RNA sequence: CGGGGCGUGGCGCAGCCUGGUAGCGCACACGCUUGGGGUGCGUGUGGUCGCCGGUUCAAAUCCGGCCGCCCCGACCA
């Protein structure tokens, strides 16, 4: 071994951004592409997205929304119909000016989001209150010409899910907005094992064109916050712009009340930054495309035969129990190499089978969520699937518990502006700051400019009042943090 | 767009100051060896030195211009 350091990724504590990139490349989740700001999702990375997507898709459908697909190209004039929307998105639009070798009569926008084109269609589909609520979701790509990009967190093109609903009443639309926020929150915590705070966005952080934006926010391993999903109450802004109206039960023409909500491939970045360690990725079992990997160990030819036979029957048993399992029978790579390789890729459980285990009728289980080798346990072959199921549950819960503890340790209450400023000093994050804010954008701007922390969420629950940390006027409880 | 850095096999770099026809590590291929925490040895594949021009008998190296990329600051799921 020439240099052991070369085989390791940049330590997380030393350079978080370097560590993040190393893990993505070494775990083969994604790669850079020839197009600036765009990445390639490699099979291992895309498999995580698929697992996440499939589960969220089930949960979305349970709310009554149905999947549809709208075009990627949007007439330029559509974007301009809603004043705040056009103002919010204009700088980051990709515009198609030519097609079929000719200049287009009207340029086409590559969708940055689909509110406008969906409203155009909704206006034609909705006539009566009997057509409502109308709830559609689409899984697609969107393009936003960002100045600075980071793999998964902010790329020029990204994949997401965008739900769009239209309702007869404001009350119903507001309820839908909050219901989807709760879908995202429970999905993030239960499936991805990412602890979240949630709440309302400040006016400055609100989606362009929304009346109210709600968010779920996670705290990454470096103490920075990451917006993990948003749910918007759009009021009648787009309905007015696109004349989306219906006849109510009094035969009166009304504008619909709307919502939109989305999560993106940014969640892959959150998974990495919340759970990953210096050995690489750590995937919660529920989202892990591969939940267990079997590494056979042998020395002599006859051992090889016995060990492989035992490994095969293990594989069959685990797969029959619905556990996503892989047998790593590669020759010419040592077991030690395989251990490190699969740890880098975040597989929750490694099953080691060697001659000693075959003789004893058992296997060794090594869990990815606990680093020390002492955490290896022996499991009898006959009881393997139930032991595995139990272990996977335990790992899922433990990863969530670890992340929650990390978040709690990095959450601080401030009632003194100077203390907040000191906490946010320096590079990297400063954790979550819980404070009181009067709601005045001027105070928010001052915090942002002086501490680089922004308002992440104004909680809906456990609200409390106190003097604004900046100006001292009566304020509400809010979370501030430096964010991605 | 302002500030800093860099372009040399797939990746990371040395060579440049003091011109003389390209080298190291990793990866990759093959063979043997090894195998319960990144095994070792050997052999081998692979480069118009970012591009254009100039100086020179001779340019990766010196000079001029251009291009591209990365990092740091102002927008954002």
Image (cartoon, coloured by chain):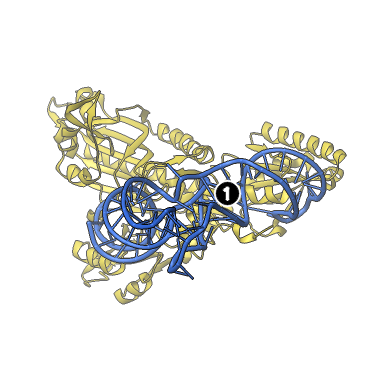
Chain colours: A yellow, B blue
In the rendered image, is residue A209 in sight? no
Give the percent coordinates (x, y) of residue A414: 35, 71
Q: In this view, does B71 lie above or below A396?
A: below
- Left or right, A71 with respect to A211, comes to right
- Residue at image coords 67%, 60%: A372
User: What residue sits right under mark 1 in the picture?
Assistant: A396
- Residue at image coords 22%, 61%: A439
Give the percent coordinates (x, y) of residue A262: 35, 41
Q: Is residue A470 above or below residue A370?
A: below
- Residue at image coords 27%, 67%: A447
Number of numbered labels in the structure image: 1
In depth, the one of A231 and A329 nearer the eye is A329
- Chain bearing tag 1 is A
- Left or right, A168 with respect to B37, comes to left
- Residue at image coords 46%, 36%: A53
Give the percent coordinates (x, y) of residue B71: 38, 59
In depth, the one of A84 and B62 nearer the eye is B62
Question: Secondary structure beneath disc 1?
Answer: helix
In depth, the one of A245 and A308 nearer the eye is A308
In the rendered image, is residue A146 in sight? yes
Q: Is residue A442 above or below residue A362?
A: below
Give the percent coordinates (x, y) of residue B64: 28, 58
Q: In which quarter of the image is residue A450?
A: bottom left
Which image quarter is the N terminus of chain A in? bottom right
């Amino acid at each position: 071994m020439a240099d052991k350091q070369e085989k390791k990724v940049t330590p997380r504590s030393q350079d978080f951004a370097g560590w993040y990139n190393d893990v993505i490349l070494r775990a083969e989740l994604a790669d850079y592409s020839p197009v600036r700001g765009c990445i390639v999702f490699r099979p291992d990375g895309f498999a995580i997205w698929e697992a996440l997507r499939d589960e969220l898709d089930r949960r979305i459908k349970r709310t009554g929304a149905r999947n549809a697909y709208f075009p990627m190209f949007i007439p330029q004039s559509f974007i301009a119909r809603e004043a705040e929307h056009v103002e919010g998105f204009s700088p980051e639009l990709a515009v198609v000016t030519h097609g079929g070798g000719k200049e287009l009569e009207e340029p086409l926008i590559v969708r940055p989001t689909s509110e406008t084109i969906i409203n155009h269609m909704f206006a034609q589909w909705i006539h009566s209150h009997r057509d409502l609520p109308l709830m559609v979701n689409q899984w697609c790509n969107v393009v936003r010409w960002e100045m600075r990009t980071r793999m998964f967190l902010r790329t020029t093109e990204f994949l997401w899910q965008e739900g769009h609903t239209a309702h007869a009443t404001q009350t119903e639309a507001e309820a839908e907005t909050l219901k989807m926020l709760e879908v995202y929150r429970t999905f993030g915590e239960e499936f991805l094992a990412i602890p979240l705070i949630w709440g309302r966005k400040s006016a400055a952080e609100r989606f362009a064109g929304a009346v109210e934006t709600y968010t779920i926010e996670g705290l990454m391993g470096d103490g920075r916050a990451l917006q993990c999903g948003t749910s918007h109450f759009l009021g009648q802004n787009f309905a007015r712009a696109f004349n989306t109206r219906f006849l109510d039960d009094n035969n009166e023409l009304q504008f619909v009340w709307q919502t939109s909500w989305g999560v993106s491939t940014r969640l892959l970045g959150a998974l990495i930054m919340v759970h990953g360690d210096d050995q690489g990725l750590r995937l919660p079992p529920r989202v892990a495309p591969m939940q267990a990997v079997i590494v056979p160990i042998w020395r002599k030819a006859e051992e090889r035969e016995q060990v492989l036979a035992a490994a095969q029957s293990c594989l069959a048993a685990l797969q029959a129990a619905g556990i996503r399992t892989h047998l790593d029978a590669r020759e010419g790579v040592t077991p030690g190499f395989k251990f490190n390789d699969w740890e880098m890729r975040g597989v929750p459980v490694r099953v080691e089978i060697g001659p000693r285990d075959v003789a004893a009728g058992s296997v060794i289980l090594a869990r990815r969520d606990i680093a020390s080798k002492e955490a290896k346990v022996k499991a009898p072959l006959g009881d393997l699937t139930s032991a595995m199921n139990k272990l996977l549950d335990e790992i899922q819960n433990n990863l969530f518990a670890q992340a929650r503890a990390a978040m709690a340790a990095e959450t601080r209450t401030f009632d003194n502006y100077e203390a907040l400023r000191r906490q946010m000093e320096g590079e990297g994050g400063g954790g979550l700051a819980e404070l009181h804010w009067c709601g005045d954008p001027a105070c928010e701007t001052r915090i942002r400019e002086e501490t680089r922390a922004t308002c992440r969420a104004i909680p809906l629950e456990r609200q409390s009042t106190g003097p604004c940390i900046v100006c001292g006027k009566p304020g509400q409880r809010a979370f501030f943090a430096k964010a991605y």
